[in-house]
Image: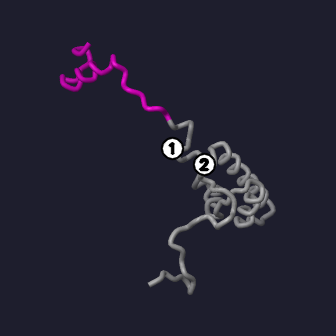
Amino acid sequence: MERMNNGRRLRKTLHKPKGLGIRYSDLDIQKRVEIYNFALEKAKEMISKNELNLHELSRIIMRNYGVHIWPATIRDWVIGRKHPLRNPQLNPITKAPRRPPDPQIIPTTLGLLYSDRSLPHCI
């Protein structure tokens, strides 16, 4: 049986409308931040005129950048729920390379672990 909502068939998954621009997730981080700042600037202009329309804002971004962004994502940007740099895999600021532990610390750490845990006895 198909899932229905008010007589309309529901999609199995959300997807970008066919033929509309490139995917937002395929962009590099600088371009994402640029689109995010542009969207917030346009949203502030629309709010000051008291005519915020997220669908229209999505169309403006599509015209200027060639990227389709869902109006729900723009809404989350405007209210502060989402941000392009909050994803730790994409954020170059919080993404730190993994380093092995310093070799000088390993004997001290093991000594503390297996002793009475007082530092003067391990040194």
Front residue (pair 3, 111): 3
Classed neighbour count for the residue bearing mark 1: other residues with Cα under 10 Å, few (<14), some (14–19), many (≥20) = few
**Residue 4 vs residue 66: left or right?**
left
Q: In what element is the residue under mark 1?
A: loop
Find the distance from the CA under tag 1 to the CA under tag 2: 10 Å
Residue range of the region highlighted in magenta in the rendering = 96-123
Q: Which residue is most to the right? A: 49
- At horizontal 75% and vertical 52% (from top left) the residue drawn is 41
Nearer-the-camera pick, 109 or 102 = 102
- Compared across the picture, whether 104 is left or right of 41 comes to left
Quadrant housing residue 49:
bottom right
- The kind of residue on which mark 2 rests is Pro
Q: Relative to 42, does residue 31 appear above or below in the rendering?
A: above
Q: Is residue 19 left or right of residue 110?
A: right
Which secondary structure, mark 2?
A: loop
- Which image quarter is the C terminus in? top left
Q: How is the image coloured?
A: one colour
For residue 54, what is the image quadrant? bottom right
Q: Amino acid at mark 1?
A: Pro
Identity of the residue drawn at 30% across and 21% down: 106
What residue did someone put label 2 on? Answer: 84
**Percent coordinates x, y for residue 27 in the rendering:** 63, 48
Q: Where is residue 51, by image quadrant?
A: bottom right
> Could you tell me residue 25's position as x and y percent?
59, 52
